[in-house]
Amino acid sequence: MKILVLNGNTTAAVTERMVAALKPICPENVQLIGATAPFGQPYVSTRAAVAVAAHAVQDAVQAAVEGEEVAGRAPFDACFYACFGEPGIEALRAEHAFPVVGMAEASILTALQLGERFSIVTVGAAWPAMLRDLMRRTALEARCAGIQVVPGDALAVASGREEGLKLVRAAVDEVIARQMPDVVIIAGAALAGYGTALAAQVPLPILDSLTAGFEQALALARLGLRRGG
């Protein structure tokens, strides 16, 4: 099987970091191919950047699909859209037959199977408002206990592993104390891997959005279901 790991940001290092983080949990018979948005912002963190990313990811996926076709290789079995919020995911699903799994969707669905209320820890000051829009669209306001922002620049938090982990842990502790959720989602490409690192240190289920999303993409790829057939 072959899964496309799609990054809606233009920072290729984030794509590489996510693919590297997934390889230890990836079955041997599954190939991971990363794709990075060809234009837009280094890290999607504003409404304007979301709008641009929705266009950019269409080009990124189309280029990846055409690249496999030209090389005579098998098509993708699924696309894991590893950008929390998934701008343009509906268009991707309309254009491609393979399943497209969104990082936010998959994480939230997993959280709902583990508890009544979930909290989200992310990075980027504009994301809480955008995620509240997502909660309203999906009628999940009552299940979301709250959204907590990790301070600092997203790419700096992503690259400074030791300091980033301290910041995320502090945000998780505050969420547990103030919001009292049943599950905490560590959300976004910049925080990929931090949830897994903290899972054994926190008394609640901690979901890493990268891992949760990938596991669902893997499940759909195994089912072999394709749109229209």
Image (tube, rainbow, N blue to C red):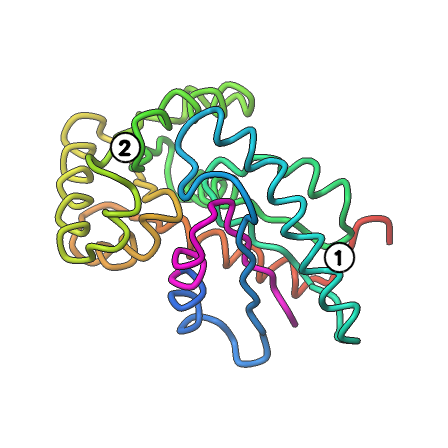
Give the residue type at disc 2: Pro
Quarter of image, res 141: top left
Where 196 sits versus 49, above or below?
below
Q: Residues within 10 Å of mark 1 (few under 14, many from 20)?
A: some
**Residue 5 painted magenta:** yes
Residue 24 horizontal side relative to residue 105, left or right: left
Magenta segment boundaries in residue numbering: 1-17
Horizontal arrangement in the rendering, residue 195 relative to residue 59 (left or right)? left
Marks 2 and 1, the one that precedes in the sequence: 2
Q: Which residue sits furthest bottom?
A: 28
Q: Quick one: quadrant of the C terminus?
A: bottom right
SS label for mark 2: loop
Residue visible at 49% across and 50% down?
Answer: 82
User: Does residue 114 appear to the left or right of 60 in the view shown?
Assistant: left
In this view, 209 is above or below 120: below
Q: Quadrant of the N terminus?
A: bottom right
Q: Residues within 10 Å of mark 2 (few under 14, many from 20)?
A: many
Q: Magenta stretch: residue 167 in it? A: no
CB within 8 Å, label 2 to label 1 = no
Which residue occupies the foreground of this view, 21 or 224? 21
Which residue lies at the image location 42% right of the left edge and 57% below the top edge? 211
Residue kind at label 1, given as amino acid type: Leu
* Residue pointed to by mark 1: 225
The label number, if any, that marks residue 6 in the structure image: none
Question: Which quadrant of the figure has residue 179?
Answer: top left
Question: In the image, residue 213 lies at what x, y percent?
Answer: 49, 52
* Nearer the observer, 60 or 181: 60
What residue is pinned by disc 2?
Answer: 181
On screen, residue 211 versus residue 160, left or right, reads right
